[in-house]
Amino acid sequence: MDSVAKNLSNNARNSQFLYIWTDCDREGEHIGYEASIICKQANPRLIVKRSRYSAVQHNEINLAMNNPVELNFRQVEAVETRMELDFRIGVVLTRFQTLLLQRRFQAFQKKVISYGSCQFPTLGFVVDRYKKVKDFVPEGYHSIAMEHTASESEKASFKWKRFRVYDFETCFALYSNCMQDPTATITNVDSKEKLKYKPYPLRTVEMEKLGVRFLKMSPEKTMKVAEQLYNKGLISYPRTETDIFDPSTNLNALIQKHISDPLWGSFASKLVSGDGFQRPRAGRNNDKAHPPIHPTAHANLNKLSPDEKKLYEFIVRRFLACCSKDAVGYQTTVTAKIGGELFTTSGLMIRERNFLEIYKYGAGWNEQSIPVYTVNESFTPSRFEIQSSKTSAPNLLDEADLVDLMNKSQIGTDATIHEHIKKVQDREYVIKLDKAPNKGRFVPSNLGFALVDGYDMIGLDLSLSKPYLRGEMENLLIKICNSETDKQSVIEHCLALYRSIYMKTASERQLILDSISKHLDLAQSSQGNFSGTSNRNNFNASSSNGTHITDNQNSSNIVGKCPYCNSGDLLMTSTPNNEFKISCSEHNSGRCAFVLDIRNRDKKIDRVTLLVQKCNICSSRPRKILFVFKPGSVPPTISLSYEGCVFGCNQMLNEFLNIPQRSSSDLVAGRSQSNGSNVIEIDSFPNPQIHVDIDDYELDDIVSILDSENPLDGNFVNTTSKNNYNQVNSGVSVISEPNIPSSSTNIFERVKRAKFFKGGNNLQNQATTSDNTSDFFNSKPPLKNISLFNKLKNPRTKKKSTPENKTSNPKTNSSLAPPTCYCNIECVSKVVRKKGPNEGKNFWTCSLGRVNGCEFFEWVNN
């Protein structure tokens, strides 16, 4: 800026007049004032004048040049007041937050925790809405729906006057009363003219909101494109709070410029001819500086960029719609009565579309036809029933919602709202989601959520995260512009408010620290010696290229004994992208096929660390793993740092990592991770679903070892089963070997030692089990409780299909009764589908499949 100041000084020395041509708003007035100070230092005799205009057009510029005015020093004073308050408040509270967190948490040693009087209320809006969505509890309600079909083309849906009731018995009683005489009688038919009002003239906030909704452009992008159009002389000044056209504005001349356009030229011609023209509606806002946003020249759309084309077309259509007439329709409302309950329906016929012909941005008004009814007419409803539903949670905020809230609460100006939204994203206080169903909506980051939650726990009415303090400041700035108060009084008043809030906040700062510890899982240090890291070994595998390491690797890479083969060690390798792989040391030799490969394609994992602590649930005692997730990858209520075991006992971690459940057949068959058999990808939040891949099992054949789980430690405990064995619906019972203590056996071990028998009255099912193991079994578990190693069993020795083996079956072969296979369970019948001489023939085979069961085979007709 020194070069700009030097240039101003050089030109001012030999000049007589200085004309200020900056933007005609508060900020523009202040910039012009600062420029005049620099120029008058070089030439004290300089005469300063202010030019006021609203569009870069020939007539506007000439008018402003010939009618200069004085600088508005009240607006200059208002801007200086805001700048001083923002600076003093921001410096004090940024320093307070930064030092508070840096002294207690190592993670913030190199981070500035910025505070802004507009930033934090904006963050507060996002956090408040997130809490409402998270804490929402749906409530069931009931209503009565009625329909009447008069003919194939005429149908009416009636709405219940009561709308809804929350008690089913009450709704059922009203419904039963109606059903005593299920004949509806028309009690009233009301027909009248109805208007659909045209939109108000366009102002900045409305343009930003509709840009998000219909143009799919962020407020920041919308303002950038609008400035480009303004600099090209195609639209008026895009930063305005005014939605009222001055009576002296020559609207007809502006419309005349568009009569040759191929898209809206015919509509513009109709307005110019006087057919359909009407003065725009007057809104409630007038900044007395700029007119509403409108086109100032016709543009060839082919010469504009795609974004410029979209925004320019929107502004033109909005302007032409404002100059048109309201849409006119004819609405008929019908009221029917049945059993003392009233129901209404309405039909609409549009007579004059007017502005609807040109405006297509959310102004839909659709015709709806209904049968013709007369008073006292009776009919029998074609549908009359109780409908039940639930209340739905509010949506997370998107940019249009945020712009609207900020504007109503006076957080920022029409020219700065989009900057504050971008700033809270740059500060990593809020995150804009990029995947459905909440694409484009905001959630707070863990840090943003923790800060606001900490301020809220202090319990101040004028909290630093609420909009009230900033709203008070904006109201006082308006009073400065209106000469109702002065700069010094406003500064003293606002500083007194913030000072009292600061003193209370500083005295309760421990609540903020506790909130940070809770939501970011960070240990506090009162002496500056940061704890919580001495027992963690940063994992630096010697094989960082993702290849399998052998059993001669450093012990710091050993997770534990392999629960699959019981002979090798589980070794952990990582890549520079924070992807990691756990494989058995016997994998390369072909003696064990266990591989767990977790990929990090979306960069949601920031760091993976192998800890010293071991899992107390799994009998093999594998070491725990610390996951550090990036902001936005987990909900704010879940810590960014999470440690746990990935071998089935910690179902929450398994579900969050989206670890699929694989059967042992994948591993026994020797399938590598290259074909995706055990590949895990970290999906974006939220994705808690476990995808279970069951090769040869039907849903009813799945036998779970789990019935319920302890959510505190991840241990699976059955609290309901008291029998020695439980028969599953599929006819498969699980009987565990006796004398296996449940407390010392992990899920994998229990599955591996389990035996499967045919259910029913078979004598083999009378085997007994010890009480401490039978509690781990259930009759029909939920599918989601199947953990990683539930399906992993030792590879069994497959029996050959020999005559000796066939004669050992306890059942005789019959075309009516299925035989039993070598596993002693009932066979299933299948059909040959391969082309050849046996195509279409039925055969018996093991219901568990050839891999997980046995190789029993027999033709049905044998």
Image (tube, rainbow, N blue to C red):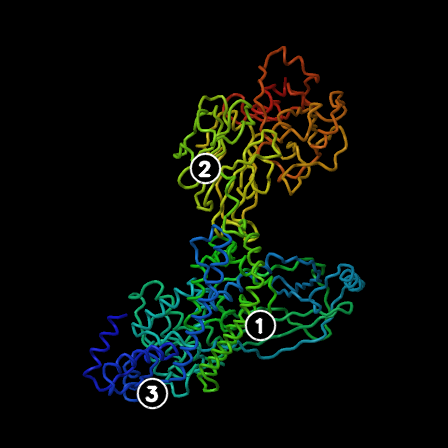
- Gap between marks 1 and 2, in whole Å? 69 Å
Instruction: Tell me the kind of residue under disc 1.
Output: Leu
Query: Which sits in the foreground, 92 or 336?
Result: 92
Q: Which residue is mark 2?
A: 539
Badge 3 or badge 1: first in the primary sequence: 3
* Position above or below: 738 against 635: above
* Left or right, residue 618 beside residue 477: right
Instruction: Tell me the kind of residue under disc 2.
Output: Phe
Pinpoint residue 423: horizontal percent, then vertical percent: 43, 63
Query: Which sits in the foreground, 582 or 298?
Result: 582
Badge 1 or badge 2: first in the primary sequence: 1
Instruction: Tell me the kind of residue under disc 3.
Output: Glu
Q: Which residue is mark 3?
A: 70
Badge 3 or badge 2: first in the primary sequence: 3
Element under label 2? loop
Q: List the single residue furthest toward the front.
A: 527
The image quarter in which residue 27 lies: bottom left
Mark 3 closeness class: few <14, some 14–19, many ≥20 residues within 10 Å: few
Mark 1 closeness class: few <14, some 14–19, many ≥20 residues within 10 Å: some
Query: Which sits in the foreground, 498 or 760?
Result: 498
Residue located 34% across and 70% down the image = 227
Quadrant location, the N terminus: bottom left
Quadrant location, the C terminus: top right
* Position above or below: 733 against 361: above
Element under label 3? loop
Q: Which mark is residue 348?
A: 1
Between tags 1 and 2, which lies in front? Answer: 2
